[in-house]
Image (tube, grey):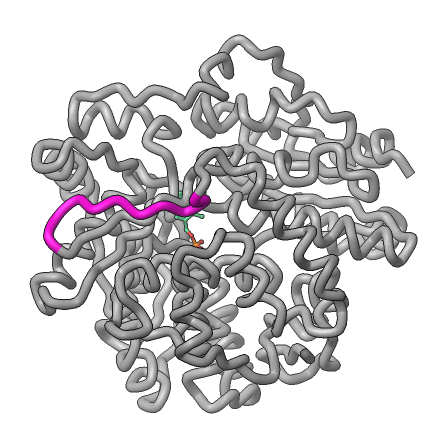
Amino acid sequence: MLYVSTRGEAPPLGFSDALLAGLARDGGLYLPTLWPQLAKDKIAGFAGKPFAEVATTVMAPFTGDDLPRPALDELLAATYRGFRHKAVAPLVQIDDNLFILELFHGPTLAFKDVAMQWLGRVMDHELRRRGRRATIIGATSGDTGAAAIEAFADLPQVDVFILYPRGRVSDVQRRQMTTPQAANVHAIAVEGTFDDCQAIIKGLFGHHEFADRHGLAGVNSINWARIMAQVTYYFTSAVALGAPHRPVSFSVPTGNFGDVLAGYIAKRMGLAVARLLVATNANDIMARTLATGHHDVRGVVATQSPSMDIQISSNFERLLFEANGRDSAALRGQMAALAQGGAYALTPRQLAAIRADFDGGSADEAATSAEIARTWRASGYVLDPHTAVAVKVAREGLARDPATPMVALATAHPAKFPEAVKAGCGQEPALPDYLADLASRPERQQVLPPDLAAVERFIAAHVRS
Ligand SMILES: *Cc1c(COP(=O)(O)O)cnc(C)c1O
């Protein structure tokens, strides 16, 4: 399988080169040259199969010859062995035709583990094969940093440095980053904001001599290998609810647009998906784009669902490219307008193609709390605030089409956001047993000023190579 850049000015790469590159050299995102097709009987055969086995079938066409099948089998078996629920991504019914897909049974209680646990293993595998090392760097406002630290801890070929704004992540999120004791992972508390952290990351990548010397690599969801690992649970959940014989809809709490894009890819591969609902919080740029055909960036507001507090949904670029007949030149124009003026218009063709598959919806702070309360009262199920946004939008979708099963993706465990949950339904959600002692584990973190040179010195002193 070959991968092309959405911007059309970088050479096509095989899977493992796209994996290690992350972003394409022309600033674009990688997509496979074609969508592999899964026949109806093959999809029907997923029923009752272990998650890792379905993942192998879904992902093998994307890795192609770059990863021999036994290696893929082994990496995926190891990836999902670490999940605390046997089904990996179980379904729970909370109302008529309304189901929750629990994606938070990985080590850091957020859905990012589903893809990050795979990314860590496949990167380590590939680096080892090439006799290379890499230094993973990232800025986080919470979930991504913890997921990356868990995924890359103790892997021999990589060192990990995660920057987060000191005092601006939740207690649980900070402890998940500072309590792992592996020598190759480093949580850096920057005395500044998330934007300061991101500026430092940009500065590190922009300092080419430093970046090359330490083999810097990123792990955010522009990396294709993460997106492809999220396709699997659309298949497993839809099949459990009657696909391929009856279509299923999904409501997806959306930030960077990676998760909902994976649902679109499942549809392109042959899964019977009726509607994909892009559920946003008060930062509703994606819902507005779907409604108006106009994409315009406003300021980010802080909400109780912080992992969706975003204005630039990077992965939307992949959908824009698909929806316009893969016209790179037109896309480059839109991305230049976004960079310069913070806005662009979708072409009529893009808007029509996107509306054929997607609906938008949003929940503001009051609606999010009301949904946590409503679902708790009606079914005794405790939603985290991200999932509550999806459930609220899912109910709107069900009102339009009550006959089609609706799956709301649960992207975080409620115990990760205890204040919002308690405010919503009065219940203090408990951490699962394996994290019950999180508050008493020793923490290890480095506090640094918001200064590129200071971070460079720290990295240079701590990389193992
Ligand atoms: C990252 C994240 C999201 C948003 O997912 P995207 O793929 O960025 O759209 C939603 N909920 C939680 C809990 C997350 O960590």
Residue 375 magenta-highlighted: no
Counting from the top left corner in percent of width and height, residue 425 is at 16, 27
Relative side of 60 to 461, left or right: left
Q: Residue at x 12, y 59 (%)?
A: 396
> What segment is highlighted magenta in the picture?
87-96
Q: Please determine whether, in this image, residue 276 is positioned above or below residue 252.
A: below
Quarter of the figure that contains the N terminus: bottom right
Residue 90 magenta-highlighted: yes
Which image quadrant for residue 222?
bottom right
Counting from the top left corner in percent of width and height, residue 150 is at 62, 34
Front-most of 6 and 237?
237
Count of numbered circles on the image: 0
Relative side of 416 to 67, left or right: left
Q: Residue at x 30, y 76 (%)?
A: 357
Front-most of 156 and 318?
156
Q: Residue at x 55, y 32 (%)?
A: 192
Q: Please determine whether, in this image, residue 425 is positioned above or below residue 45.
A: above
Counting from the top left corner in percent of width and height, residue 319 is at 44, 75
Q: Residue at x 25, y 28 (%)?
A: 421
Counting from the top left corner in percent of width and height, residue 104 is at 42, 39
Quarter of the figure that contains the C terminus: top right
Which image quadrant for residue 430?
top left
- Res 418 seen here: yes
Which image quadrant for residue 270?
bottom left
Front-most of 156 and 335?
156
- Res 320 seen here: no
Relative side of 25 to 322, left or right: right
Front-most of 374 and 236?
236
Q: Please determine whether, in this image, residue 263 is positioned above or below residue 210.
A: below
